[in-house]
Image: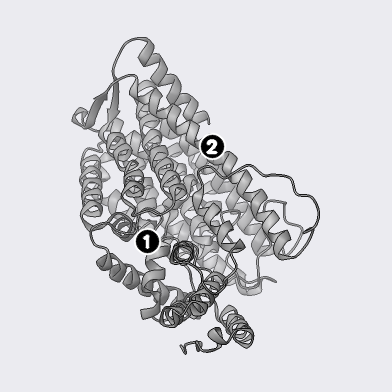
Amino acid sequence: MGIAALFGSVSVLSALRGRVVAMPSLTVFAAAVSMTPLLQLLVGTIRFAGDAILSSLYLFSFAMTVAISFHAARLWSGRRVLDACAWVVVLAAIASSGMALGQWQMSDGLPLLVNTLAPLSRPYANLLQPNLLATLLVLGLVGVACLFDNRRISAAVSLLTAALISFGLILAQSRAAWLELAVISLVVIAKRRALTGSLGLRHFAIGAMLLILAQLAWMVLDPLSAHPVARDATVSTASTGNRITHWHEMAVAMLRRPWSGYGWMGVVSAQYDVAAAFPATHEILGYSHNLVLDLLVCTGIPLGLIIVGWLLVWLWGVATSATDSTALLALVALMAMLSHAQVEYPLAYTYFLLPAGVLCGLLCADGPTASVRVVPAWLSPMLLCGAASLLFVVSVDYLTVEQQMMRLRFEQARIGLHAPQSTLPPIRLLSQFDALLQFARTPERKDMTELQLGEMRQTVARFPSGANMVRLAAALALNNQSEEAVQVLRRVCKLEPEATCQNLTALWAVLGARQPAIQRVTWPSA
């Protein structure tokens, strides 16, 4: 909200003074891309309005963050803005490193916001996943470099802070982090002439030595700990194998819909479409674990290539124009997140996407004036008000969805069925959740219309849990569509964990004992 208020203030002041507003070309491009989900909704590529609206808001927030950072850098200088960002990231990295240390050494007594680790799990602080923690800590190391470069902290403080963050980074045991550090090293070596402050290549060498020492210390201390968190090599191998399978799935899905794609937030539907033909991964995807593949699958090959190509040209432009430490450090921080985005999906989280937008805005402000576009002064406030209104309605909808889901759970548990129920407000924009609720309340039966079956297919393709797939297969079997029912069942054990697969296989046998039409559909072998 503070970011929105700042952007609104800049826009309104410009409008009152009767001036046009200068925007970086990246903002204009990202704002244009943010309209594509709505166009996909109009042509039917995206089936649920809620998916289109959320995607559009998400992309628009990135565009606005780029604009805010651009204007802030022009008003107060890029160095001051980068310093402010560095302080925030370094403090967050220190706190997260402390949480990771606590998860490593303490089985209980952790603070409220820090989860206790399962045995042999890697620490992740409060970021849901170890690789996300690792990327935050890599950004924390870049933040330390920024503060040292601008003489905001001394060499001793920099060394101690970097040592703490480095040990937290080693605890995460993230291969993505090593990829990020390798990319950062290559960029710094290639652009070493841009190191115009206190920072030099020798300081990066010291940082590398700290990481090596932290790795050696962890290798000695972890086996002695009461709660070792060493990464299982079997799990690592399986993770790599699944990722390659997922990329193959997305490539095949992309070729099935090369022109239109599956729509924004459509990776899950793409996986559902092709999963039956691939080995089991026991994972349901929300993203393909590769930013380029995500764009190609969601928007189609032509538009996806345009987006990727434009971004590569922009990135090359700001990289070649980075001639001082401020621009170089902003560039390496951005490259860290982009490197991670090639093997996972950190930019799916706003706490990485919006900082990436800030860095992009700083780089735009440092770049050539040719990258700036002029837009009418009234356009920015109008778009901001529209986005803020949508965000308000979406927020209210989320509260309604939560209430509706809670009521559904009570209904399924047969609690309070005869008690008077208050009327809940309708779901206005998040239509995908409204469809899921209707699906949950629609019993599978004979003589269902093709419209009803079609709605069930769309909902299951969007939310392909094992239970949903079994219910769809049962509805198809009861309505004489046995071949399609088998294809739906074939996906269950491909996407769900083995234990869930066994439970659902037993459930199908129970349903078959009650309904001869279901019994005639044999659960497919792996």
Measured as percent of width and height from the top left, residue 341 is found at 38, 56
The x and y percentages for residue 334 are 36, 46
Residue at the extreme top: 17
Q: Nearer the viewer, mark 2 or mark 1?
A: 2
Instruction: State the SS at label 1.
Output: helix
Mark 2 nearby-residue class (10 Å; few <14, some 14–19, many ≥20): some
524 left or right, relative to 220: left
**Residue 399 x, y percent position in the rendering:** 63, 44
**Mark 1 crowd level (few <14, some 14–19, many ≥20, 10 Å Cα):** some
Disc 2 to disc 1: CB gap under 8 Å: no
Helix, strand or loop status at disc 2: helix
Residue 490 picture quarter: bottom left
Q: Nearer the viewer, residue 489 or 253?
A: 489
User: x and y percent of residue 335 in the render?
Assistant: 34, 50
Q: Which mark is residue 179?
A: 1
- Indicate whether 410 appears above or below 19: below
Q: Is residue 481 left or right of residue 478?
A: left
Residue at left offset 47%, top offset 45% = 350
Total tally of numbered discs in the picture: 2
Residue with the mark numbered 2 = 393
For the point 24% across and 42% down, the residue is 193
